Amino acid sequence: MTKTKIGALVGAVLLALGLAACGSSSSTSSSSGSTTSSSSSSGTISGAGSTFAAPVYEQWASAQSGLTVNYQAVGSGAGITSLEAKTVDFGASDPPLKPEDETAIAKNGSPAVQIPMFLGAITVSYNLPGVQTGLKLDGKTIADIYLGKVKTWDDAEIKALNPGVSLPSTAITVVHRSDSSGTTSGFTAFLATVDPEFKSKVGEGKDVQWPTGTGAKGNAGVAGAVQQTAGAVGYVEQAYALQHKFTFASVKNKAGQFVAPNLASATAAAQGVKVPANLGIKISNPGGAASYPITSQTFIIVNKDLCKAGTPGGEAAAKGVVKFITYGLNAGQSILSQADYAGLPASILAKSKTAAAELECNGSPIGA
């Protein structure tokens, strides 16, 4: 996928991801367990949620033979709500489900299942004319910017981390998400972990009360606001930052190293992460000298028995969702780097594949 193609995608709120491939129009689903999802079965599935994940789901949709994927990039919180309301076949969320979310989804008639799909870096991107190389920032300084305590780019906190860099006195315009956002959850989880004041005053989650700044909807909205405002800073997923040709900071990690966001540092961040029984992994300020500290996971959320839960598209959509997930966990992992995302470590990937293989329709495994 080219950066131009990603840009065309992220500029829209409603992402019609279906690119039905040429081939047989047979509606018979494959039962061969193919890991490439090359079945010629046709159908349409619907999903909603994470804007962080949207470029990847567009890419994976284009690779599906005969499967149309209609995905609304409305934020993780809205995605979970849509699944609870049975208006989509799958939800997409960056933070793991809370117990109350699992309970609400299970009311559809089948337990909630969250399947880790891939990883990505959340950048601290900025628009600062004259500063063309990446600055160094630590968690406390980023927190102080978002608390409204650091107001200009030549503040002593920033200068202390960047000796020899000529920093202008430009006012900092803080940009944050206005919607219920998994990217916000990942960003605030890091800041709350490293800065007690931020934890007490703002906390972490998909929705927080920001003490300063301007809100924008979606990763695309934050990216657009940063691009249009000299002196602005915002937290956006790496693919969006690259599309907008942003400069972004290297961030000090738990090991004391300043690390730039990239595929290698995002992958390193997930090494050794604990995987709970419900697969609700959470990466927040991970250890390891090579780890980028603001790295997020993302999940596809479904009911274990999609048909009993009353998925809107019925049995055909249940099969289509499993086909889509199976492709993403197999061939889809190898093309993630084209959209600037990182694959799952082998230990987590194996558990995700097992969870996908156990999805059902009316008590029977769906398969791929």
Image (cartoon, rainbow, N blue to C red):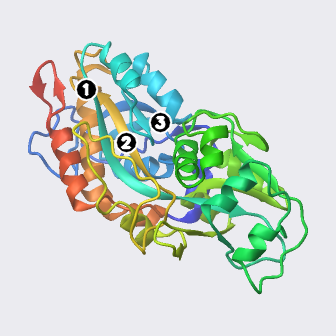
Of badges 1 and 2, the one in the foreground is 2
| Outermost residue toward the bottom in this view | 164
- Please tell me which residue is depicted at 59% across the width and 60% down the height of the picture: 123
Q: Are marks 1 and 3 in contact (CB under 8 Å)?
A: no
* Disc ID at residue 299: 2
For label 3, the crowd category at 10 Å Cα-Cα, with few meaning under 14, some 14 to 19 and many 20 or more, is many
Q: Counting residues from the N terminus, which is met first, the one under dot 1 or under dot 3? A: 3
Q: Which residue is mark 3?
A: 71
- Please tell me which residue is depicted at 41% across the width and 66% down the height of the picture: 337
Image coordinates for residue 351, horizontal then vertical, percent: 19, 48
Looking at the rendered structure, the kind of residue marked 2 is Phe
Vertical side of 270 occupied by 200: above or below = above
- Please tell me which residue is depicted at 36% across the width and 31% down the height of the picture: 44
Of badges 1 and 3, the one in the foreground is 3
Looking at the rendered structure, the kind of residue marked 1 is Ala
Q: Quadrant of residue 304?
A: top left
Secondary structure of the residue carrying tag 3 is strand
Cα gap from disc 1 to disc 2, whole angstroms: 22 Å
- Please tell me which residue is depicted at 58% across the width and 51% down the height of the picture: 191
- Asked if residue 299 lies left or right of residue 36, the reply is right
* Disc ID at residue 316: 1
Image coordinates for residue 103, horizontal then vertical, percent: 34, 18
